[in-house]
Amino acid sequence: MNDTQLEISNTKGICFHDLNKTLQTAHQLVVYRSLLQDQVVNSYLSLLESLTSYPPVVSEINNAYHRFVHNLIMQETPGKWPDAWQRYLVTAILADENPFSRQAEYLPFQEISPKLIEAARHDLACLHQLFQTSSESIRRAAIERMGREMGGGLLSWGDMSSRQDSPVDSVVLFNSGSWKDDIEEVAAYYHAHGTGIFQRFQAFRWDKHGDAGCLMGISRPDAVNPGDLIGLQRQQAALDTNTQYFLAGLPANHVLLYGPRGTGKTTMVKSLLTAYYDRGLRIIELPKQHLNDLPAIFNLVGNRALRFIIFVDDLSFEDYEVDYKVLKTVLEGGIERRPDNVLIYATSNRRHIVKEMFSDREADELHGGDTVQEKLSLADRFGMTITFPYPNQQSYLEIVRGLAARCHIDLGDDELVKQALQWEKNHSGPSGRTARQFADHLVAEAGLKRRKQK
């Protein structure tokens, strides 16, 4: 140890030499090296660098400390582990997309490259050192460097994030004494939850900027409880069965959910995410105007271990639109094979998805009949069509009663029916959507009444 190291190691119990060692260890990462470019991790390392520099520069430490705390707070990493930095680091490791995490997602642990496993073990040992440097120890080191007058008011970042549940909470790394020995558990997490953006989000939207398309994670997907789908047991059972075949790796069909607006078609597809996310299901919402990008989406997700439903809502085409031809090719199978881990679920309130015009039938068109058949046959290309009946007053009231019971709405049946019928007349007619809106109204009304009584 040289004189400078002695100077920075013996300051009232703060071992700055250990901090310097942690900093140098971080730069030995190989498989997980992209974490060094992560904004939070990078600002953390910059803070360590400012703390271990000699002589200390108070302004640099002050700036580095608060920049790191700012970056950490802005991430709002959910989870129950009390130290926000430690929670963020574990979350970043489990979301990192690298050769090891990708192989672990797709392959059993025994089939992953032994050399890759060895490199990942090395990196986990390095990352464990970063994890073991707690919030309070860094804060005390900063106060020691800056002096109590300048550093006494430094915020602790210990527990600044929300304490929401997170899939990461159960990971063994939080309570482990040796991360390198937990390599199989880490690989099992990747295998079950995926990596990168597919680990962080349950649902996605295909977004387009000019000619370039990309998957955008949906931070707060509409969580629909399957039990809220009242009066649709037959339809729900059919869709669930097909989806379970798909998740099990068995032959499954593309599905068209057909019926009038407001009958629960879209809601039923959303409910699949609540039911099957833990089994590796992800949903990608694809606007119909971007159907030409289906091959690009296949390329992005086709080599993943997860299962993807591409969801096209309100599928219909005017006679002049030709995007349906891309979908038709995908459904009936073109030269390029559809990935086994992808299905298409679509909703429509039009039985013949492509609108037929009189001009298609003109007698002087040589192949007029072929044009008509091509347009009318798109719905037939879905292996399964689930029909949603037109709602009547009886089914509407059945849904209202079911939702009222689930929402604990304290209203007698006669009064409930009276208000429900009045609501239906003043709004969009009897439908599942109208029933849901009515139930939400009653919940809000009761909640406001309780607040006024306090």
Image: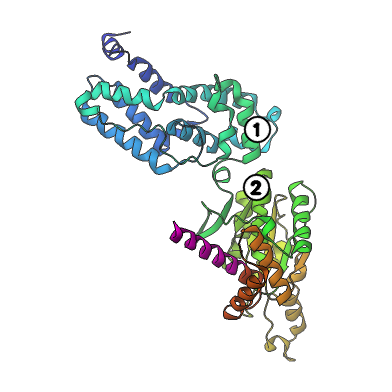
Q: Secondary structure at mark 1?
A: helix
140 left or right of 109?
left
* Residue 277 numbered tag: 2
Count up the numbered dots. 2
Front residue of this view, candidates 415 and 62: 415
Q: Residues within 10 Å of mark 1 (few under 14, many from 20)?
A: some
Tell me the SS state at disc 2.
Answer: helix
Give, as a single range, the part of the protein colored magenta.
436-454
- Vertical order, 266 against 35 (above or below): below
Measuring from the top left, give residue 346's x and y in whole percent.
67, 65
| Quarter occupied by the C terminus | bottom left
Residue beneath the point at 54% across and 67% down? 441
* Mark 2 or 1, nearer chain start: 1
Instruction: Name the kind of residue labelled 2 in the image.
Output: Tyr
Question: In this orientation, which residue lies closer to the viewer: 300 or 190?
Answer: 190
Question: Is the residue under label 1 in contact with that under label 2 (CB below 8 Å)?
Answer: no
In the rendered image, the residue lying farthest to the bottom is 363
Residue 264 in view of the camera:
no
128 vs 252: above or below: above
What x and y, as percent, mark residue 351?
72, 76
Query: Where residue 188 is drawn, which disc sits there?
Result: 1
